[in-house]
Image (cartoon, helix red, strand yellow):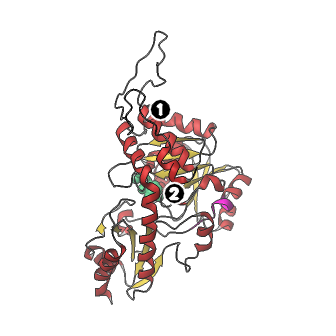
Amino acid sequence: MKFETIAIHSGAGSDPGTGAIAPPIHLSTTFLRGADGEPVAGFGYVREESPTQERLETALAAIDGGAAALAFASGMAAGAALLQALPRGSHVLLPSDGYYTYRALAAEQFERWGLTWDVVAMHDLGAIRAAMRTETKLVWMESPTNPLMQISDIAAVADLSHRAGAQLVVDGTFATPALQQPLSHGADVVLHSTTKYLGGHSDVQGGSLAFQEKGTFFEASNRVRTLIGGVASPFNSWLVLRGIRSLPARMRMHCENAAAVAEWLVRNAAVDVVHYPGLKSHPGHDIARKQMSSFGGMLSFQVKGGREEALAVASRTKLFTPATSLGGVESLIEHRATSEGPSSTTPVNLLRLSVGLEHPDDLIADLEGALSFLH
Ligand SMILES: *Cc1c(COP(=O)(O)O)cnc(C)c1O
């Protein structure tokens, strides 16, 4: 089946008790046990597994083409469970550009978890090779990256990781499974912050891990989740499941709108550089074409000037709302260096856009108005 069909029908099926077409939300925290003390329907306690979450996990595995998937309370909870599943003494390679909080997690928690790490430029295969150690167990990459929109070659990094005896996890939040299928390019695990495009309406937090194999890495991550409790709630599972149904349709329009905005920004005199993998001028464009079916709804650009000019632009837009996060139907603009805080390495003149589903003409007119004072 094609992706659009999988997105609609995975984890669906009418409710056997009532015939309801929309999936029921089972809020129960505990489930009936039989005379032998065992759960009668396979569910025991909500921290372990629950029916709405199970439907979501069926869908998550299907849309990423994985053997199994786990639903979490957030993208960070998903990533942390994977990292805590590594044996003590493991070495991890993290991307130099990528979701900032994972690098904060490394700096503040890895030592306590018995992990060591290095930060490398993940689009540079030579740099990855040079950073590999015998105890490297996990390579962590994002493509496209947050916020510089760098592209890494998933198949090449997977190959390099496997030769060194490490597994590859790809944070595919920006691309979503609608545009990019990391497991089919050799990744072992794909992570999403479902808070973003999978939820799609800026009203639910969640995370997911989909695994190439239902093996020891899956089991260990599942065990961490059960013990620590970072599982998705029934209601949040339901919202993410609902979001998945319209993901392919939304992504088509996000891509169209972002491409229009990117092409317009490139020609604007107040803009220094535009980071969007759909532009032919983007250094990762050819690799992006190879591994993505389209280029997504996220982009960033650097204004001529510095922090003040960038902040001024973000405060002058009317449709692009100044806020962090991404992937909702409404367009957002963010001064990323401020959100990341004092240790951020993001250029101070950079603005990140989550291009929503408004009409592209209105979005472009909004940016035109906000940038005009810089000409
Ligand atoms: C938001 C985000 C995360 C973290 O997800 P939360 O749901 O906020 O915990 C991880 N990776 C990327 C690329 C993100 O954008």
Span colored in magenta = 151-157
Position of residue 298 measured from the top left corner of the image (x, y, whole percent): 44, 67
Query: Residue at left 71%, top 57%?
Result: 159
Q: What residue occupies the far top of the structure in this picture?
A: 35
Tell me the number on the disc at residue 178: 2
User: Local crowd at mark 1 within 10 Å, few (<14), some, or many (≥20)?
Assistant: few
Tell which tag, 1 or 2, sits nearer the viewer.
2
Q: Quadrant of the C terminus?
A: bottom left
Residue 2 sits above or below residue 69 on the image = below
> Dot 1 lies on which element?
helix
Using the image, determine if residue 306 lies above or below residue 296: below
Q: Residue at x 55, y 45 (%)?
A: 62
The mark nearer the N terminus, 1 or 2, is: 2
Q: Residue at x 32, y 81 (%)?
A: 309
- For residue 363, what is the image quadrant? bottom left
Tag 1 residue = 227
